[in-house]
Structure formats: structure tokens, C-alpha cells
Amino acid sequence: MTGTALLVVVLLVVGLAVALLTLAALIGRRTVRGRTRERALEPRCRRQAEDLVFERLVPHPRTAAERRLLRDMLLHHLALLRGPEADVIVRYLEEAGHIDELAEQLRTGSADRRAAAADRLGRSRSSQAVAALSAALTDEREDVRVFAARGLAHIGDEAAIGALAAALTAPTRWALAMVADDLVRLGGAAVPALLGIARRGDPRSRAAAARVLGEIGDGRATDVLIDLLRCADEVDSRTQAAAALGKTGGESAADALRHALRDPAWEVRAQAAKALGRLGDRRSVRALEHAMPDPNWWVRVNCGEALARLGEPGLTALRRLTHSNDRYAADQAWAALTIAQRQHARGGPPAQTTHARPPHPVGDTAALSPRTSATPRPALP
Amino acid sequence: MTTLLHILAWIALVYFLTVDAAYLAMAARTLWKARHDPEDVLYDGYDVLYRSPFTPPVSVLAVADRPASEMLALIRDLRVLDYGEYEVVLVDDGSFPETFPALYAESGLGAVPGPVRRQVSGAAVTGIYSPPSWPGLKVVRTESGERTALLNAGVNVARYPIVCVLASDAVLEKGSLLRLVRPFMDHPAETAATAGVIGAPAEDLAASLAGDAFWYRPAELSLLAGACWTVRRDMVVEVGGWRPGAADGHADLVFRLHRSLRWSRRPYRVELVDEAVVARREPGDLRSSLRRDGRRERDIVAALTGARSSTGNPRYGVFGLVWLPFSWLADVVGPFVETVGYVAVVAGAVTGLIEPSFLVLFLLAALGCRLALALAAIALRQPRLESAASAPPLGPMLGAAAVRELGYRQLANLWRLRPAVAALGAGPPRPRRAEQRPRPGAG
């Protein structure tokens, strides 16, 4: 009895393992076969694609696989081409029914198929794809929505800006990177839609919009970003607004950023310091000097680096800070000063600096510090 | 004598059947996930991510634990990494004295002054150096210490929110770092860590793909199989960094990450990114492979003994109730039971004390099932890897997997016994003060 039961159990386990092996082999074989077929078709498809682009010879793919491969190859070429060559490809894709097929896939396919179709339709740059892509902007899947919005942007459709901006609503960072890439490329045209989101969007999309506005660097965004920096409840929005203001610039931006050095959230203070360094407004030296003895490491680092970017007044402030009672600020000031001097020495005339000795003994101060340890200070140049 | 042999053989057989059934269930899950049509593969957007300011910056962390020529090769490879914003933190404790002069001569290192955040307890930093032509490279000189202490020193110096821990003989394949970071972008709040697989030579990839710790196991333990992994820096700091007392300390860190996140009931994810492939610069021989397995065994056993209080504890959810007990069974009990089982069954068969039918069933359960699972893993994964990396062809990999299951595994079990016993005797890694009291204001 025991022997039979054992036999059954062992055979069951081994049988399952073998069944699994068979299934895995089948799936693997499907992948291998697909790739082998693709490799075999590649030279012919490439020839047909080149004939279409350069000789205007209409291709006649013989099988469905060849047709698909040719389509993808043409889409790939399309990304690199402009002018009449690109027009020939777009016209072929439309006349050969590829756009209709992809639009159908976008309507009825599985989630992955829909996303792939939206991606291909967008890259086709065909005006026939606009309706299908616009409809896909409300798809339940984020990547389908993102590909559709990007596709509209590639085609140059008016709806694209609004769609791309709307895709900033609760995005993953991947979607944000994708959408932002197009929005930044659109530049000033995208700013009004983004400002709308920065004013009225939900917290996550406001932060994302602020970030993209910073990348675009359009001065029209300054007032909205200042409002966001002053009034937003969520730390992320304030942080992104501070970072963006460093890129959009303006006098009022510097004022707001100096004020933000007193923000309760260290993330905002750190970004404000960094942004002030980027703006290069020497009137910020005093505020940065006061902000430098901060409990947070990143705030101290950014204040030090910002001061070092503000020329001689900043370096003078750093020299004063090396005597600060706050040893962490003093350490950071010392580091920023030394690096700045080296950069001056490499890139131009050395800064006129005469240092007092280091404020603390050279050596590993880890034992003294609950917050930082210092590397031994090298002799100043 | 007969009774003893029978008892040992039965224990081994029950063990094999239990573990095989568990592997089968996990393999079926992976197979279900892999069923979709490869034509659905999407545009991944890595060209956009590469240049996007929204891609998180990464600190690549390596320890100078190999001769200078290899470290120079590593640095040259990392200099042309296809990633947007990153820095390389190379920790050198002087164990290879010629490394620092060689780096100095090649890139003209200069001292970088400045305080270091001491957020985890590690080897004392004696200096940080960086070449003027590449400020992203930081060579951190420390006092000599264990590998875990050096990694902690590197974490302290690392500036960026994600740390990529790379073996010093590893080469990241094209696009691998972007692939490793992608989960952090898809699920920024939840992703705690990701790992890549070893892609070359065939034996290493076969071991990665068909090994116990790879696709049969869920993401919870998959990091252990990674040759290269990325982890959120703040989470490393939160658990106090690597602890001494284990070979690499990775298993210990992974377990503590899980425990910390489970304990605080935060949703999190760890992912094994099988398109992120790491090649070893020099193929390992049998001895080095065995040594690596032994080191990994010591690492895991030490980590498991450190996580005793979590094992079977419902507070830690599936991790505590399922995966930790399973790891005890497969990684600690496994080498002992398998070795004793093989010896008992072979001895019984030779002396005629065990029936031939039992011997056949035992071999089917012990070897046949494992072999089928290993081959299935390779058959499924290898074709998918081909496009992402310079993966070896299917034939040699299947051969390597067969050799691994029918010979190498048994040898490795023997090799794993000593470190397992040593690690069990040594107990859990020592706790660090940094774990008990987080440092304020180190942000």
C-alpha cells in the first residue's frame, strides 16, 4: 500500500515537472521560431523598405509576418527621416491599410496590444491615426494613454498638448519621463496647459507640472511657481517649484527662494539653496550664509555649493562660515571653499583667498559627531 | 542497520518530494506569467530614459578587492556606462596596495575635501579622491576592514538615492543599469531593490537561470541570486547597512530589509530583472564556483539565524510564514539531507538492503524532477535573453544545466556543509549601534 502511494506521488511530481518542461520548451520554441523567421525575412524587408524610400517602388510583402516586419522597419526609418522620404513612408502605411489595422488593434486588442498599437500609430505620423489616438486618451491603462498622447504630439495634433499635460495626472516616473520628453520638446506651446495643471491639478500632477515647467525654463511660469512654492500644502510640490524657479529665473523668483530657505521641510530648503546658486543672484549671499547652519546635510551641502557659485561675496561668506560655531556648517564651508579654489585654479585666475587655519583639528571627527564624520582636511592650496 | 538506512532514505525522499512540489508550484506561477505573445513586447523607452532628467541618479558601488589591472578595467567600463546621471564609488582599503597608485597614475586623482555623512557604521574613511576629468568617480580610501564595512563606507559617501552594488569582476551589459532602475520609476514608492542576473559564461547563466534562488522563488528571495543589485539608499541606512559576520552580507541585508518593511507594514516590491545582465570579466573554474557557493551558503545561514525571530512569525506575513521556513528547509537542511540521503540510498542499493524500485523512485524524485525544472527554466528564459544580452546559445546552456544538476549540485552540497556548520555555530551577525539609534539630521 505504502509502495503504491509512494509510486503515485513520485510519478505525479515527476510527471508535473516533465509537463512543465514541455510547456516551457513550447513557449521558448515559439520565441526562437519567431526570431529565426524574423532574421530570415530581414534582408528582403530591408531591401523593400529601401526601394520604397529611394526608388518609390511599392513593396509587396508575401506573408503576414513579412508585412509586420516591413511595417516595423518602416516605422524605424520614419523616426530618422524628414521631408519627401518620410511622406512616402506615411503614405504607404496609410494605403497599405497598416494604420487601419493598428487603429483596430488599439480599439479591441489586449492591454499590451493596445499599448503597442498606440506606440506604432504615434510613430507613423499619419493624420489618419488622430481619431484612434484621441479616443485612446481615456484608456484604462496608463501606458496606452501615454503612448496615445505621445503619438498625438509626434503627429503634431492640437489635442496633443492637452493630452500630454493630462497624462501628468498621477503618473509613474516612467510615464513622467516619457511625457516630459515631448512636453519639453514642445517648449513654450506646452506652458499654458502646464500652468493650468500647476494651478488647479491634484498634488502629484502639480509637482510633475512644476518639474516639467522647470525643464522648459519659460519665464511665464515664474508667478505660478512662486504661488506653488508659497502656498502648496504638499512638500513635493513646493520642492519641485523651488527647483523649477532656479531654472526659470527672475527677480521675484530669487525673493521667493530666499524666503523658502526658512521652509519647515528640508527638501524645500535644500532645493531653494541649490536654485539660488543656479540663479547667481549675489543678493542671496546673506540668506544662504544664514541658512547654512542647518540640521540637514543636503541643505548644508547645497548652501555651500550655492555660495561657491556666487563669486567673491559667496567665497567671503564661506570663509566666515569656516569659523562658525556650528561645526557641521564650518566643515561644509571648508569643503566648498577648497573645491571652489581648485576650480578657480584650473579654470582661471585663482580666487584671492587667505584662510585662517581649519576651525577644527585635522582627523576623523566621527567620534565627535552624531551627524557627520569628516575626512581629514588636506592642506589648502 | 537496514532500518537506519531505510529511515535516512525515506527522510531524504520526503524532503525531495516536498521541495520539488514547492518548486513546481513556483515554476508554474512563473510559466503563467511568461505565457504572453512575444509580439506584444512594447517600446521600452530606454532611449528617452537615458537622457531624461526624470531618471533617478544612481551611485554605483564597488569594492577594490581584486588586483589593480582588474580594477582599472572595471573603472574604464563604468566610465562609459550608458546611463544619464551616475557616480562611481570605489572603496579601497589598501588590500591590494598597487590599486590606488595605478588609479592615480591613470586618472590623476586629487583629494576631495568634505564631511561624510556617517549614517551607517563602516570602515573609517581616510580620504576621498576624484579625477578632475571625471568628478563622478570617487575613490574612497578607508582603513582595512571586512567587505561589509567597506560597503557601508561606500554607502556613506554615495550621494544619490539609489545604490547599485556591483561585484568588482562584473561588467554591466548595455542598458542593464537602466533596466535595473526602471522598476524604481514604475513603482517609485514601493520598489525597495532590484537585481540582475549573471549572463556569461554559459555555466554562470545556467546557474543563474536554473539555480534554486532564481525563477522558482518569488521576488522576496530573488535578490540572493543577483550578481548586481540596486537598492534604495535610504532603506540601506534604515536597516543599518551591511553587518559583519557573513561572507558578503547581502543575504543578511536582504532579510533585514524584508523584516523592516514587513514590520512597519509598508507595501514594497523587490524585483529580479532578468533582462539586466551582468557578465563576469573572467570565467570561473570549478573551484571558484564551489567557493562562491560555499560563501553564499555561509551568508544565507548567517542571515537565517539572524532572522530566527521572524521565522514562522505571522507579523511578517508570507515572508515569515512561508519563505523563511522554506529557506531553512532548502538552504540549511537541504545540503545535509541531500548528502546523507544519497549516501544512504547508494550504500543500500550496493549492499542490497534497499529495493531497486525504491532506488528508481528516489533517483526520479531527486534527480529527474530537478533536471526537468532546470531545463524548463533555461528553455523558457534563454530565448528572451538573446535580444537583451550576449547570452550563450541554448545548447551549451542546456548542457551546463544538466551537468549542474547531475554532478555539480551533489558536489556543491558537500562543499556547502562546512560553511553551513560554521555559520550555524557562529550565530547571527553582530548587531550594530547604527541600527538601534538612527542618526538625526543626516538626511
Image (cartoon, coloured by chain):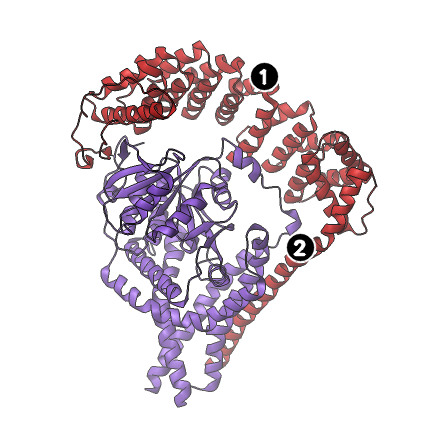
Residue sitting nearer the eye, B299 or B264: B299
The spot of residue B239 in percent (x, y) is 31, 44
Q: Is residue A224 shown above or below B69? A: above
Q: Amino acid at mark 2?
A: Arg
- Report if residue A50 is visible in the image: yes
Residue sitting nearer the eye, A368 or B306: A368
Q: Is residue A341 shown above or below A59? A: above
Are there few (<14), some (14-19), or many (20+) residues within 10 Å of tag 2? some
Chain A display color: red
Look at the image and tell me in which quarter the C terminus of chain B lies.
top left
Are there few (<14), some (14-19), or many (20+) residues within 10 Å of tag 1? some
Q: Residue at x 56, y 50 (%)?
A: B388
Chain B display color: purple
The chain that hosts pointer 1 is A
- Report if residue B240 is visible in the image: no
Q: Is residue B160 left or right of residue A33?
A: left
Residue denoted by label 1: A192
Look at the image and tell me in which quarter the N terminus of chain B lies.
bottom left
Q: How many marks?
A: 2
Which numbered disc covers residue A341? none
